[in-house]
Structure formats: structure tokens, C-alpha cells
Image (tube, coloured by chain):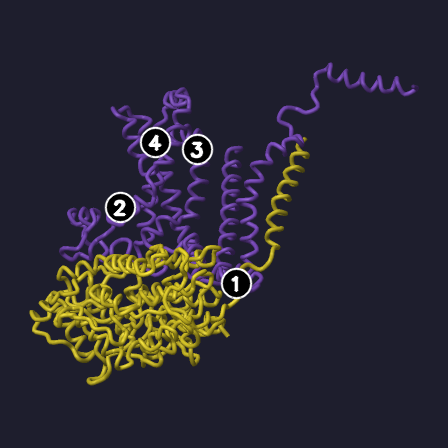
Chain colours: A purple, B yellow
Amino acid sequence: MQQEPEIAAAVAVGSRRKGRRKPEFLPGESRRIGYLYVAPAFIIYAAFNLFQLGQGVNISFYEWDGLTPGTWVGLANYREFFTEPAIRETYIHVLELMVFYALAPIAIGLSLAVMLSRIRIRGLTFFRMLLFLPMVITDIVTAVAWTWIYATGGGVAGHPEGPLATVLKALGLGRLVPADGWLGNFHTALPAVGVFGMWGGFGFSLILFLAGIMKIPSSLYEAARVDGANVWHELRAVTLPGLRYELQVVLVLSVIGTLGTFDEIYVLTQGGPGTETSVPAWQIWSRLFNTGQVGSAAALGLIMMVIVFAVTYALNRLMERGASD
Amino acid sequence: MRQRVRFTRRVSVLAVIAIVAFTAMSCTPGTTVTHKSAPPVPTITGVTETEPFTLTIWDQESGQVGRIWDQLNTEFEQKYPNVTVKRVNRDFGELKTLLKLAISGPHPPDIVEANQGWPDMGQLVKAGLLLPLDNYAEAYGWDQRVSENVLAVSRWTPDGTQFGTGSLFGYTTMGEIVGVYYNKTILEELGLSLPTTFAEFEQALATAKQAGEIPIEFANSDGFCGIHEFGTIQDQTAPVTYLTDLIFGLNDLSFDTPENIQAATIIQDWVNKGYFMPGFGGAGYDDSVNLFAKGEGLFMITGNWIVQNLGADSTGFGFFLMPPMQAGGIAVATGGAGFPLSIAAGSEHPDAAAAYIDWMTSDHAAEMLVPTGQIPLATGVTTSVPSGTVLSDVINAAATASDNNAIVPYEDWATPTFYSTLVAAIQELMAFRITPQEFVSQIEEDYSKFQSSRV
């Protein structure tokens, strides 16, 4: 009975706290019950992603043909990444593709967005839709059309010749047309794949940039103009800083997309001519399904995953640091 | 609070890593392999089961051949009314990727049409997924109907470590041959006769080029056709025994030989002189076949399978084997057995599957298939092919090569990765990205790597 006052005091303290309306947890502060909410999604994620990731890690330590028991080879599959020129070359190709898949779409998307936001023309929505269209149609379908665009027929009468060669010849630029077609020529195959990707990719950046520009208060532009700014100044001082987040999204997504390039290689070139358009994802697929090197494919897939993570993290840090400057 | 967030984040990261690591520590991938021994010789041939059941077959036949297969299947079902034949049709590339998954699954097909060689059949034999057919061959007399070299390309030691000898894992009575098609009209216009030596063939190429004709109709964006162009030249520069042993992996051979360098040098020389169709690097095989059928190009080096595109009874085209280096020598050609039929180890009806294979390789089936350009290999098949047609040329050429023991198996069977390696290397060779010496070294690297891993 002696303790009663203490309890009462404790209760009093508690109630006093309640009285001050200080809840046990702040809204948004993490609580254990949160795990319960996350659990269903996490279980599905673990069953369909993490489990397979683990299996992939396991397989990557073996030399395995996919059928018979594998042989433990330790890190040999990972070592291949540094020693095999066929693998190194895929990353060089993907770096080249970055120019077409990430840098060019941003440049084109940005200039088009600036143009479209400044001029008033009839049917603007229609043109916007038209420019966005390549983004909506499946790569596989457009890639088939592009094989035709890139065909040259070797300049033989009666051979199927694509419109690109026809137009160039009509302009008197026939010497720019490679005999093997843009996709069959060792020097032009990779840039040709790149141009296809650029065409498919700039619509995405355009739409994001257009939306971003509309968000920028017009008073900023007016103020800039009052200060005597020209188009270039406006772009540097108002538009680009205003589009920082859009730029970040486009850059990160397009870089990840480039690293994962597969569809267009499968349809346009099959990694050829030679191995001129072989990219990491193609190499992984080919090892997995064509040549029965499952362990090596798993190791390369995991390395690619780590690279994608690292690049994404680096890009985000870079952009955030830029923002705080 | 900040610290607490950091703590929980660390806990979740650790949890994810733990799950990944836990699954990663699981056992060796791949199931234990058991190699089934050949089922006993059936006392009665044909389908003996009376209960209704389904035979599933995975094949890669299309076009006319595919339609004839459907017809043969219907006839088989009429012969054995309790059997339903279910055909799963995939193209060559799809079958390559899907077959291993299908046949190693819980409900494998009964019969599969797998390509010979290390990339396909070799992998399946090694994994114990195909049945040895030796006793069926004895019961049905398959080994008496075709020559040993047709059977050899489907033979493997039961553990799948040696190609070309051992148990029989696939059977076919249809053959293939790669040689030179020619356009009779153009040949006549140029005043040329059929070349009998390699030098005469090269002379014909020069004449055609000078007259403004395309000497060789050829397109290589698909890659496989380049293997046949190179192989056809290599068949004349290198000895038959070398080529056969190389593919079967016998006698520690190397790809880096003067004969192979010579073949690579010749093909580069032909590119240099403009003997191949302009723009071949960017054109597709099917297009080149259509253009040749329409009358473009003096020659086309490819296999018997384009006979149906040219028209089996066409008299406008002819076919000969690439002539030998020396006058009076033997013309060697790539080819031999067509796609064989095999029985999956997991089939519940192996005896019925054997009866089905016997039906599909019967003289009756051959008679139906020959007009599509397939070459009958079984002795005693009588086909009425009118002489002077492209089909009769193809069949006669194949018979000559077979009689001379001058047929070399497909080179891309030599290692599991050889097809991809050859395609890329030949494209690079023909674009002068690599020298003939670099070409043979590049291929030798793949070859020796596999051969040393085998022992």
C-alpha cells in the first residue's frame, strides 16, 4: 500500500504528459508496427527477387551448363570480367551508347522543350504527342522498321534500299552510304543502334522538361528579361536551375536504361557485325542461352547490377551536391 | 531520432543481405545426373500399348516440310488410333534456347529434334536427358538402313564426354549437303562450262565479275551462311580426316594450321576482288535466297534446304559440289545427316516413341519429303526425281560425296560455343578487321579451351 503514491505519481506524470499533448511517437517517426505493414510487400519481394538474387550469387561461383551439376570455381567467373576482352569491350560499347541514349536525348529534349514552351502554334498538343510517340511504341516494333530504314542493298539495282540511303543519294551524298548498310558496317553499326535509341528516348526527356518549364514561375523570366537577358542567359540562369530535378530523373533513368540495353541489339544486330555491338546484357543473354555458360552469365549479371547501383548512387550524389551549391 | 533511423536502416540492409546470403549458401546448382541405359530390345515393334495416350514432339520443321510432318502425324494416328501426336513447333533459334528447359522439366516431351554436336545434343546427353537408342536401332534395323557416318554424328559415349563414338542418341534418314548452286542462263551467257577444279571455279568468278554479274550471291547478317562459305573452301584446302577429327575432338588437333590459314586467305581474296554480293554484311540470308531465285548472281554457296525456294523441279538452276584443288581429286562437302529425332529420358512411352521415329524415317516418309529438297539417305528408297532438275542435281551430288566418303560434318558442332565464335570471327575476317592468322588464332583459343576442359 505504501507504493500507491508512487504509482499515482507515475500515472500523474503520464497524464501530465498527455495533458501536454506530447504523443509517444511523432507522426512519421518509425515504429515497430511499420514492419507489419511492410511485411506483405517484403515477403513477395523476397520470394520473387531476393531469393533469386541469392541463387544468382550462388550460381556465379560455379562453372555450370544449366543441366549437369556445376563445378565450384570460386571467383573465376568474376576474374573473367577483368581478363576477357570480349567482356571489357561490351562496357566500352555501352559507354559509346551513353552519348546517344543519355546525353543527346537530354540536349534534344531540352532544346525542343525550350522552343515548344516559347512559341505559340496551333495544334501544339498534336506535335507534342507526335514527338512523344516513339517513346510509346514498343522497341521491338520500331526496331524492325529501322532495319529497313538502315538498309542500303549494297547499291545493287533491285535490292531493297531504305529511305535513309535514298535521301542521301538524292542529296548527292551517296559516298556517305556504307555498302553493307549502317547496321552491317563495323564502323557505323554501333552509332546506328545509338541513333535508333536516341530517336526513341528524347520524347521522354521532352515531356519531363516541358512539364518542368511550365512549373517555373513566369515572373522569373520577366525579371530576367527586364535585366536584359537573352535566350542563352535565360536558359542558364532560369530554365536549367528550374529543371534540376527533371534533369536528374532523366539522366539517372537513361543511364540505367543504357546499361541494360538489350531489345534493340536483339532485333537490329544480334551483337554483330563481329562483336561490334555486343553490350553487357546481350553478352549475359548469349552466355545463358546460346553457349550454356550459366555461371559466367550470373557473375556478369551481378557485376552489372553493382555497376548500375554505383552509377545511380554517384549520379544522385553529384546532382544533390550541385543543388546545395 | 536520426540515429534511430540510421539504425533501422542498417538492420533492414542486414536483413536483405542475410536473406540473399542464406540462399546463396545453398548447394551446387544442377541435379545429380543419372544416365539411363538403353531400354531392352522390344519383342514386338510398333505401338503395343492399347490405352489412349499422347506423344509430344518438339521439332523445328517449317514450310512444306512442316506440312508433310502434319500429314505423317495424322497417318500415324490413323495407324494407332489410341495415340495422339502433339506437335510443338519452334524455329531453330528458339529450339536452341527452349529445349534444354523443356526437356529437363517435370513433363518433358517424348521426342525431340535436337541439333547434333556439342552445343545441343552433347549437352543433353551429358545431362542424361536422352535415351540410348541402340536396342531400338537393332529391333527396327536402323543401323542397316543408313551408312555409319550418318549414325556417327549422333553417337556419344554414355556419359557424354566423347562425340562420334558410343551409343546412338538420335536417328534420321534425311540428309543435308552444302554445295554450289548455279544459274544456268547466266553460265551460258558467259560462255562458261561447269568448273572441275577449284582454279576453274575461281576463273568463273573472275569472268562473271568482269561481265558485271554478281559472282556469288551471299548475305551474312545472320552469320551462319558465312560458316558455310568458309567451310566449303576449307573442305578443299584441309584433309577430310583432319576436319572430321577436329569436329569429334580427336587426336589433339589445332585450328591453327596452314590449310585453315589458306582457306581464310582465299575468302579474303574473294572479298577483295568483289566476288561476293555487294553489301553482304548488311543483308539477310532469306533476302539473298529470294534474289538468287529471281535470277541474280551466277553462284550461291549454301545447302539443299533452298531447293524448295528455287522450285524442286526447276531446270533453270543446277547444283554441284565445290570442285577439288587438284584435277581428278575428290570434291569434299559439308553436310551429312539432317536433324535427328531423339527420345527424352523422361518419356513415359519410349517404345511408342521409337515406333514414331521409325515411322518418320520410313521409306514412305522419305518419298513424301524428297520433293521438298530433302536428301534420302536410306538404302532402297526409290524416288522418281526427273533428271535435269535442281533437285536431281542435289541428290546426285550428295550420293557422289557419300560414295567417296567425302562428307564433313558441320564445323559449328565442335565446341558448345563454336557457333558464336565462328560467326563473329568470319564476319570480322570478311570485313578485314582481322588477318587470316588472327582468325585461326581466335578460333583455336575457343577450341583448345574446350578440349582441355573435357579431359
10 Å neighbourhood of mark 2: few (<14), some, or many (≥20)? few
10 Å neighbourhood of mark 4: few (<14), some, or many (≥20)? many
Q: Say above or below: B381 vs B307.
A: below
SS type, badge 3: helix
> Which residue is at 70% across, 23% downward?
A24
Q: Nearer the viewer, residue B86 or A111?
A: B86
**Mark 4–mark 1 contact, CB under 8 Å?**
no
Q: Which kind of residue does numbered mark 1 sit on?
A: Glu
- The answer to which of marks 2 and 1 sits earlier in the sequence is 1
- The answer to which of marks 1 and 3 sits earlier in the sequence is 1
Q: Are marks 2 and 3 on the same chain?
A: yes
Q: Are marks 4 and 1 on the same chain?
A: yes
Which residue is the site of mark 4? A113
Which residue is the site of mark 1? A63
Q: Position of residue B156 (x, y in %)?
A: 43, 73
Q: Of circles 4 and 1, which is in front?
A: 1
Q: Position of residue B3 (x, y in %)?
A: 68, 34
Q: Which kind of residue does numbered mark 3 sit on?
A: Glu
Q: Which mark is residue A246?
A: 3
Q: Which mark is residue A145?
A: 2
